[in-house]
Image (tube, rainbow, N blue to C red):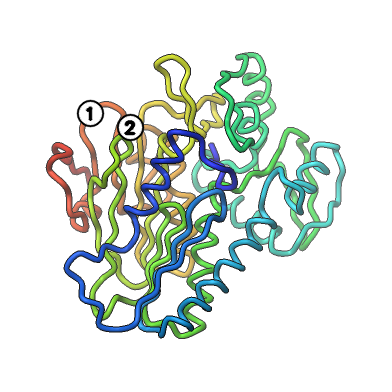
Amino acid sequence: MNRSAFTTLARPAWFLALLAAVVLAVSLAGCKKKSPYVQQMAFIFGTMVEISIWGEEPPRGRELANQVFAELEREHRLLHPWQPGPMAELNAAIAAGKQDIAVDPEIARLLRDASAAAAQSDQLFNPAIGKLVTLWGFHADTPGKVVPKPEAVDALVKAQPRMTDLKITENRLSSSNPAVQIDLGGYAKGYALDRAAQLLRQAGVPGALINIGGNVLAIGSKGGEAWRVGIQHPRRPSSMAAIALLDGEAVGTSGDYQRYFEVGSRRYSHLIDPRNGQPGNDLASVTVLVTPRPDAGTFSDWTSKPLFIAGRAEWPLMARKIGVTHALVLPIEGEAVATEAMRARLIWDDKNGPLRVVP
């Protein structure tokens, strides 16, 4: 079910994702710049990264933004699941049946955290299904428009790759299942948000907005005003709602418009259900807001995945199970739905139709 955060987005998802990065950037309407303000952009993790810094002189703001970009590039190389690097080497060793594999300490820590997240979500968040992601063509710069053969999908589902197949002791790893292939694409952008925020806070930045392909985290404020962001409509080149982010809050979105291909009238998303090996097919997008916590970025990223996979009937139950209180869900057909806590924070655009509220 992981979305790959590491590849170039395919058309037309490329246009929509790039637009989402702009739409989700800081809203400047009605805001007067009362202090130096810098915006820097770069292409990392296969998406557009934008850093907005308020309250620093431009030279220092640009320097800090470039330091963050350098850190994100390092994480990209560290966590990429198939390009040459530590993660690809680890996956090759698992596939070959090797045991007691030396693992980069940072990767080992992330795998332990991701394993806990997988258990919490009843394995709907499952970074071990990289082979399924590959089978569907999403471990490529441009996914092919080919639906895999059912027997190939069934074989991988029956192999049941799970994070519980991994035994991690300090910086050594063993796997009891060679079908495991780790893909942290559904986790990496959130982790990158938290690392970027840590660097900027350590530098004493009074206000910043970090946007990694639509995953957003706020630091401080913009001259006493909350950072206002838009939430991309999955089928239109515009936002469907806006929200004011407070210090330490993060927003994460999973959708079938970010990376997909179409065959006939059917859209196949990169968000794969590990229970049946098929792309989720009844939701267009899920947006999660996370109030301040040390791992707000990471939590906002991975939690949107099991809600999306759970689907329109079961996402409220999954939200309660994993501790998500603020969620906005747009089905492929039917009206949008939000939790009560999320509705209280949203500026909803009525042209998108009614917004139903659930507890």
**Callout 1–callout 2 Cβ contact below 8 Å:** yes
Does residue 322 lie above or below 264 as drawn?
Answer: below
Closest to the observer, 46 or 82:
46
From the viewer's perspective, tell me whether residue 95 is left or right of residue 120.
Answer: right
Closest to the observer, 333 or 359:
333
Distance between the alpha carbons at the discs numbered 1 and 2: 10 Å
Which residue is disc 2 drawn over?
312
**Circle number at residue 55:** none
Which residue is disc 1 drawn over?
334
From the viewer's perspective, tell me whether residue 335 is left or right of residue 167.
Answer: left
The answer to which of marks 1 and 2 sits earlier in the sequence is 2
Does residue 136 lie above or below 33 as drawn?
Answer: above
Q: Which callout, 1 or 2, points to the residue nearer the camera?
A: 1
Task: Name the amino acid type tagged 2.
Answer: Arg
Q: Circle 2 — which element?
A: helix
Q: Circle 1 — which element?
A: loop
